[in-house]
Image (cartoon, rainbow, N blue to C red):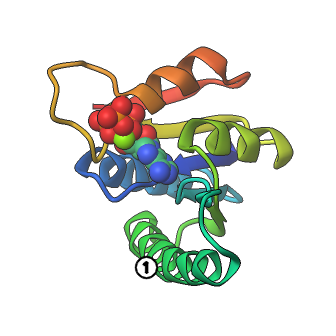
């Protein structure tokens, strides 16, 4: 049913489950494509150009490692498009879903900041509220 899926990945246990689930869905539906999104945050505006360039290079390396990890969890059942974005997570996830014409977003209920007792993290709350396509929130 869903053939163009966004997976939001921050390396948290929840996002690992989201990646595995999306891989399972792809195994059951031939021709599924997955857009694997890692948002590294916005480039800090207060930095000088040289330091900003270095920050971007470091974040690109770190993001690339995250994308490798997420791709391995999804497995080889789907074509995977790597999306490394410099922006706030929820907006980046929604932007990829809209610009790539995706029909489902799969993400975790919590993420790296899962310290409080809340059931949903701020990014999953925002995506569930603002996305125009169905959102599968993995617990
Ligand atoms: P908060 O960030 O509000 O402290 P949290 O970290 O527990 O709470 P979220 O950030 O909402 O919860 O994470 C929920 C899910 O959102 C994650 O499992 C992941 O799927 C996705 N996500 C969060 N941050 C990112 C990110 N930087 N890039 C891609 N996906 C993300
Ligand atoms: Mg978070």
At horizontal 43% and vertical 79% (from top left) the residue drawn is 65
In front of the other: 12 or 19: 12
In front of the other: 74 or 118: 118
77 relative to 102 in the view: left or right = left
Q: Count the marks: how many?
A: 1
The x and y percentages for residue 76 are 51, 74
At horizontal 44% and vertical 77% (from top left) the residue drawn is 62
The x and y percentages for residue 70 are 43, 66
34 relative to 96 in the view: left or right = left
The x and y percentages for residue 43 are 62, 60
136 relative to 43 in the view: left or right = left
66 relative to 11 in the view: left or right = right
Task: Examine the rendered structure and indicate whether residue 55 appears above or below residue 29.
Answer: below
Quarter of the rendering occupied by the N terminus? top right
Q: Kindly indicate the quadrant of the structure image that contains residue 132.
A: top right
Quarter of the rendering occupied by the C terminus? top left
Question: Judging from the image, what secondary structure is the residue with disc 1 in?
Answer: helix
Task: Examine the rendered structure and indicate whether residue 40 appears above or below residue 54.
Answer: above
At horizontal 80% and vertical 38% (from top left) the residue drawn is 98
The x and y percentages for residue 137 are 42, 29
Residue 18 in sight? yes
Residue 25 in sight? no
Residue under pointer 1: 65
Task: Examine the rendered structure and indicate whether residue 88 appears above or below residue 16.
Answer: above
Rendered-image quarter of ligand 1: top left
Q: Residue furthest top?
A: 129
In front of the other: 28 or 113: 113
At label 1, counting other C-alpha atoms closer than 10 Å, the crowd grade (few under 14, some 14-19, many 20 or more) is few
At horizontal 28% and vertical 52% (from top left) the residue drawn is 12
Task: Examine the rendered structure and indicate whether residue 29 appears above or below residue 51.
Answer: above
């Amino acid at each position: 049913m869903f053939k163009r899926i966004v997976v939001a990945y921050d390396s948290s246990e929840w996002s690992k489950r989201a990646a595995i689930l999306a891989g399972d869905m792809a195994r059951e539906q031939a021709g599924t494509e997955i857009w694997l999104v890692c948002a590294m945050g916005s480039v800090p505006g207060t930095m000088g150009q040289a330091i900003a360039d270095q920050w971007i290079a470091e974040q690109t390396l770190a993001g690339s490692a995250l994308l490798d990890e997420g791709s391995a969890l999804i497995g080889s059942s789907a074509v995977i498009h790597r999306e490394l974005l410099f922006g706030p997570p929820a907006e980046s996830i929604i932007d990829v879903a809209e610009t790539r014409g995706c029909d489902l977003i799969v993400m975790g209920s919590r993420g790296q900041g899962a310290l409080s007792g809340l059931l949903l993290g701020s990014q999953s709350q925002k995506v569930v509220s603002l996305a125009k396509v169905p959102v599968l929130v993995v617990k």
